[in-house]
Image (cartoon, grey):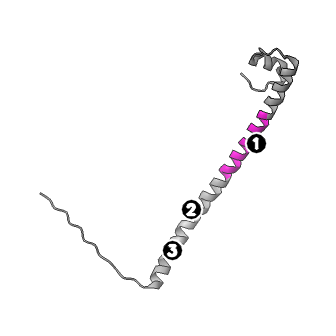
């Protein structure tokens, strides 16, 4: 049977060495962190743009729905009726 043993070794280093290692680590990691931050900011901008488009679409659909209810107070309208009311040149994407 093979037996594996582990041994812990502690090395004492001076404060200057710790500072140097810390600076080296910062120089190595900082560009990666900055790139991740830039990518996250770009992603947030894309999401904000999508949110704005969705809010615009909701506003448009609400406006159309309110006008459709005024035109057809009896209800019973279907999405195809709404699409027809919007007109073929103004397809709002309702299916």
What percent of the width, then of the height, locates residue 45?
Answer: 71, 50
Sequence-first disc among 3 and 1 = 3
| Callout 2 crowding tier (Cα within 10 Å): few <14, some 14–19, many ≥20 | few
Q: Which residue is mark 1?
A: 52
| Callout 1 crowding tier (Cα within 10 Å): few <14, some 14–19, many ≥20 | few
> Residue at point 79% right, 37% down?
56
Q: Which mark is residue 7?
A: none
Residue 94 position (above or below residue 16): above
Q: Quadrant of residue 33?
A: bottom right
Q: For numbered disc 1, what is the local secondary structure?
A: helix
> Residue at point 61% right, 62% down?
34
- Magenta-highlighted stretch: main secondary structure? helix
Span of residues in magenta: 42-58
| Callout 3 crowding tier (Cα within 10 Å): few <14, some 14–19, many ≥20 | few
Q: For numbered disc 2, what is the local secondary structure?
A: helix
Q: Is 54 inside the magenta-drawn segment?
A: yes
Marks 3/2 in contact by CB < 8 Å: the verdict is no
The quarter in which the N terminus is drawn is bottom left
Q: Which residue is mark 3?
A: 24
């Amino acid at each position: 049977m093979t037996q594996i043993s582990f041994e812990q070794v502690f090395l004492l280093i001076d404060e200057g060495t710790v500072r140097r290692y810390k600076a080296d680590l910062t120089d190595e990691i900082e560009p990666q962190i900055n790139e991740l931050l830039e990518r996250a900011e770009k992603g947030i901008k894309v999401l904000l743009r999508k949110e704005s488009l969705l809010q615009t679409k909701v506003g448009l659909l609400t406006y159309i729905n309110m006008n459709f209810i005024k035109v057809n107070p009896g209800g019973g309208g279907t999405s195809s009726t709404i699409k027809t009311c919007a007109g073929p040149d103004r397809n709002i994407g309702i299916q």
